[in-house]
């Protein structure tokens, strides 16, 4: 029975669903520090592409995160690696981030004053952290997102080192779609903060 459970968990992790932990306050109050979110890994395999407004998990596109140290003893590290491999706990050694898609390939994004625009149209952002406006004191653009990339920002705009702060890096701050694991489907833990975004991350 244990072997069957392991196989089922592995299939879920590989094809359908994986859990990640929110490490920072950059997506508050939508996602809070310590929240565990389930990511729909099946979506990219069915023709889904990131859309504006979706929270997504993606692999660090290049030095967005500081190097991570591996703590703990040998036994706990080995157990953690096994549980992470089958998707039952979040991965520790890989650098993943979660942000909201603001613009997709070919769209032009700009922030001036307190107004965020995409292709010249103002973007309404009801998900922003209370007290933040869309620009949070950082004007930029216009920036045209390359095809095959997405522009991402945190909901806690004044506490998020996102695309805006990496415009001198690879992609001009945009993240390759190939780096996107999938849309956030739900907050699965703690139960008191459970929230369902839907399989497509809406």
Image (spheres, grey):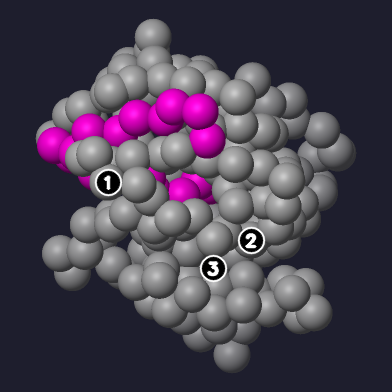
Disc 2 is placed on an element classified as loop
Tell me if I can see residue 142 in this picture.
Answer: yes
How far apart are labels 2 and 1 at the CA level?
24 Å
User: Closer to the camera, 16 or 151?
Assistant: 151
Quarter in which the N terminus is drawn? bottom right
Work out which residue is located at the far right of the displayed protein and give it: 73
Task: Indicate which disc residue 121 carries.
Answer: 1
Q: Which of marks 2 and 1 is in front?
A: 1
Residue 97, by quadrant, is top right
Range of the magenta residues?
95-114
**Residue at 49% across / 75% down in the picture?**
197
Residue 58: image x %, image y %? 43, 44
User: Closer to the camera, 188 or 166?
Assistant: 166
**Residue at 76% across / 80% down in the picture?**
191
Tag 2 or tag 3, which sits nearer the N-term?
A: 2
Residue 195: image x %, image y %? 62, 77
User: What residue is shown with label 3?
Assistant: 38
Tell me if I can see residue 7 in this picture.
Answer: no
**Residue at 73% across / 46% down in the picture?**
131
Residue 161: image x %, image y %? 58, 27
Helix, strand or loop for the magenta stretch, by majority:
strand
Q: Is 157 left, or right, of 104 in this rendering?
A: right
Tag 3 or tag 1, which sits nearer the N-term?
A: 3
User: What residue is shown with label 2?
Assistant: 30
Q: Is 18 left, or right, of 20 in this rendering?
A: left
């Amino acid at each position: 029975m244990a072997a069957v459970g392991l196989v089922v968990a592995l299939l879920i992790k590989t094809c359908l669903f994986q859990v990640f932990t929110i490490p920072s306050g950059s997506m508050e109050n939508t996602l809070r520090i310590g929240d565990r979110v389930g990511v729909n890994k099946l979506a990219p395999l069915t023709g889904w592409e990131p859309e504006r407004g979706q929270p997504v998990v993606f692999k660090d596109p290049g030095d967005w995160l500081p190097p991570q140290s591996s703590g703990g003893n040998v036994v706990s590290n080995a157990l953690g690696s096994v549980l992470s491999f089958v998707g039952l706990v979040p991965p520790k050694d890989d650098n993943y981030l979660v942000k909201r898609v603001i613009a997709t390939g070919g769209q032009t994004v700009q922030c001036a004053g307190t107004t965020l625009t995409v292709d010249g149209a103002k973007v309404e952002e009801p998900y922003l952290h209370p007290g933040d406006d869309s620009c949070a004191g950082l004007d930029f653009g216009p920036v045209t997102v390359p095809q095959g990339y997405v522009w991402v920002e945190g909901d806690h705009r004044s506490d998020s080192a996102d695309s805006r702060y990496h415009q001198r890096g690879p992609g001009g701050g945009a993240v390759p779609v190939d780096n996107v694991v999938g849309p956030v489907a739900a907050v699965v833990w703690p139960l008191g903060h459970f929230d369902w975004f839907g399989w497509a991350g809406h």
